[in-house]
Image: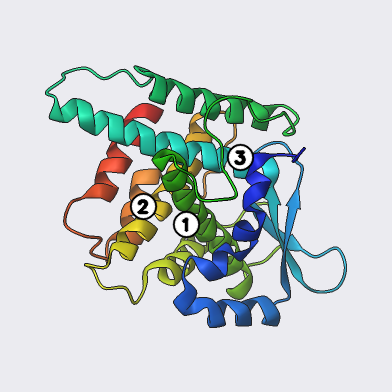
Amino acid sequence: MTRSPILLLAEHIVRAPFNVAPEKATVCAQHRDNHRISIEIVDESEFRIRVRKSKIGDGHEIVLPIASLEYLWAFSHYSWVLTQEYRSEQVAGSTEFNCVGNTRLQESHYLLKWAERNLNNSGTDQWPETGPRPTQAASNEEDVTVATELFLCALAWIMQHEIGHVVLKHPFSIQTYSLQQEQEADRFATEWLLDGLDQHDPILKKRALGLAIAILCLQSLEVTSYRQGDTHPGAHERIFTNTAKYQCGDDEVVEAVCTVVLQYLF
């Protein structure tokens, strides 16, 4: 039995910094080799995706706790489902919206709440037997497919943010980075994800959505007990700052996702 269905995506997870922006894979490989960056998937509680000095040698490790990966996937799934259902209700002219108003929303929300509790417990609780889950092969369920794509884009941005701390030589001798250092790492990750894409390229929209999901996910942890620290700006400001110079299509889909998910969170 697999420790977690999220590990069915293990190959995609460790390759995310290369595969999500393949046109920059060569530069990414140079950063990996020059700074001796490896990836460690571990069992830990709390949301603690981070970079640290390697225990052996002078390299660096990006630490990916399984529980953190599970939460990010569940958050990606619910954000997509929530936004789609909210849009449907708006089109229908509804004046009220229930965030768990049908089976689709209920199953996705239940998974998100399970993942949140798991972060606060051992971090090793078993994935619910029923409901949505990542799959190794292409899924027939659109929600699962979209959630996985958003998850990988979001994770790649977070991982590049951590790589940015290494490449930019931010000190590891402190507990938290300064606001300026966090903004520099954000910019590093965003330029890697979005630079060089035409504004009409659907890939730009997909990657920008992944960036938004990453930051909204981190914001959701601040709303609960898993605070990221005061050196991170608020989610809406952070998303706007990182996408302002990129024209991500003309249908304002990124803004719509941010608005709906922030309404849910607050």
Residue 104 x %, y %:
40, 25
What separation in Å lies between label 2 and label 3 (alpha carbons)?
19 Å
Position of 221 relative to 234 (above/below): above
Residue 23 x %, y %:
45, 78
Residue occupied by mark 3: 70
Nearer to the camera, 55 or 130: 130
Residue occupied by mark 2: 209
Nearer to the camera, 1 or 189: 1
Which image quarter holds the N terminus? top right
What separation in Å lies between label 1 and label 3 (alpha carbons)?
15 Å
- Label 3 secondary element: helix
Kind of residue sitting beneath label 3: Glu
Query: Residue 169: in sight, yes or no?
Result: no
Judge the density around disc 3: few (<14), some (14-19), many (≥20) Cα neighbours within 10 Å: many
Left or right, residue 74 beside residue 100: right
Kind of residue sitting beneath label 1: Cys
Residue occupied by mark 1: 153
Mark closer to the chain start, 2 or 1? 1
Kind of residue sitting beneath label 2: Leu
Residue at 16%, 20% in the rendered image = 94
User: What is the quadrant of residue 99 in the picture?
Assistant: top left
Judge the density around disc 2: few (<14), some (14-19), many (≥20) Cα neighbours within 10 Å: many
Q: Are marks 2 and 1 in contact (CB under 8 Å)?
A: yes
- Label 2 secondary element: helix
Left or right, residue 260 beside residue 22: left
Residue at 72%, 28% in the rendered image = 125
Left or right, residue 115 beside residue 4: left
Residue 128 x %, y %:
63, 26
Position of 238 relative to 217 (above/below): below
Mark closer to the chain start, 1 or 3? 3
Position of 218 relative to 91 (above/below): below
